[in-house]
Amino acid sequence: MKKIIAIILPLIMIKATAQNVGIGLTTPNRAKFEINGVAGAGNTVALFGGEGHGISLQRNWATIGFNQYRDAATGLGKYIYNGYAATQSLDPNTGTWAFDIIPYGNPDGTVPYLTRALAINYLGNIGIGNAVANAPLQFTNTLASRKMVMWETANNEHQYYGFGINGGTLRYQVDAPGAAHRFYAGTGTSSSNLLMTIQGDKKVLISNSGGGGFLGVNLDAAPYTISIKQAAGTGLYIQEAASGTNWHLRAQYTSQTSYAVLALDHNGSLVGFFRPSGEYAWGSDSRLKTNIQDIKPMLEKVMKLRPKIYEVKANNPNHEKTIGFIAQEVKTVFPELVFSNENSKLDKKGIENVHA
């Protein structure tokens, strides 16, 4: 018997090496080693590493199971060993290549559900999660402050660099007030131009101290540092934070003069305008006034005014002379013409209630 075994064994080895080998089929002509059929009613064709965490090969949807196999015609299969599991499959009907994650389980326990992690369709589009990949890269239609994180300072919804989606909002996030959103344009192989900075302290800067930045509103190009093309008759609007008082500066065309004036509104009412020649005109129409009274002859009061020649202290390095009046002196004669500022926020440094 020993001699017979010694003769037969080499013959079997030679035949297996030289020809295709098939298990479950009579003519293995597609590969050197082919397996046809499954165990029981499931789709698992082969399983490797079954005594620990292993890999299974499954037919029909061409699935690779990681720590997962299928021994039934329905269901999501079972665990090979304890731990997490996953599947990688190709749907031959849609051309979708899917990666699914399976929660923690025990050996031969039934897989409860799959969580889609990633899918690639036949066009090469990638869908994250359950997203249908209609673009080269697509995320699920869910609202989240963190949809894409490129750097994370801490694991929360705010301290990260990246993007999110809130209701009607594309969230562009940096991690702290000291961080900044910056936009660049390359100028060559080793340098870039800084276009705009949005600082974490709510300050917005165009360009940098090197200059060259232009800001245009409603324009294809900005010919000046700040260029505005008005929309719906609106221009530059400035509002005082505490009281809500506001000023509005705008260009206004008049058909009577065939040119535009620079109009100045206060709290929505026109108070005056600048003509192209430089004169300032303010509203003096009787319909804009009330409680109109005649005043007594003014010559005697006018003669009490004392013009002065003086130097303004601030911003006058060349000591230029000015001719005018002193507000406190005019106030004694025409108090209606003098304004005393009682808002300390606008006072000159070291001087209270500046008169004008």
Image: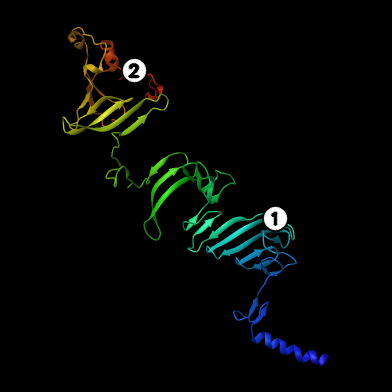
Q: Nearer the viewer, residue 320 or 125?
A: 125
Q: Nearer the viewer, residue 332 or 26?
A: 26
Image coordinates for residue 40, horizontal then vertical, percent: 72, 67
Which amino acid, by three-letter code, is at mark 1? Tyr
Residue 215 visible to an observer of this rendering = yes
**Mark 1 = which residue?**
104
Bin the neighbour count of mark 1 within 10 Å (Cα to Cα): few under 14, some 14-19, many 20 and up: few
The relative height of residue 13 versus residue 312 in the rendered view (above or below) is below
Residue 317 visible to an observer of this rendering = no
Q: Counting residues from the N terminus, which is met first, the one under dot 1 or under dot 2?
A: 1
Quarter of the C terminus within the rendering: top left
Image coordinates for residue 147, horizontal then vertical, percent: 53, 49
The residue lying at 65 percent from left, 54 percent from top is 113
Alpha carbons under labels 1 and 2: distance apart = 78 Å
Q: Nearer the viewer, residue 282 or 168?
A: 168
- State which quadrant residue 336 falls in: top left
**Mark 2 = which residue?**
340
Quarter of the N terminus within the rendering: bottom right
Image coordinates for residue 202, horizontal then vertical, percent: 45, 39
The relative height of residue 215 versus residue 42 in the rendered view (above or below) is above
Image coordinates for residue 242, horizontal then vertical, percent: 42, 25
Which amino acid, by three-letter code, is at mark 2? Ser
- Helix, strand or loop at mark 1: strand
Dot label at residue 308: none
The residue lying at 43 percent from left, 43 percent from top is 198
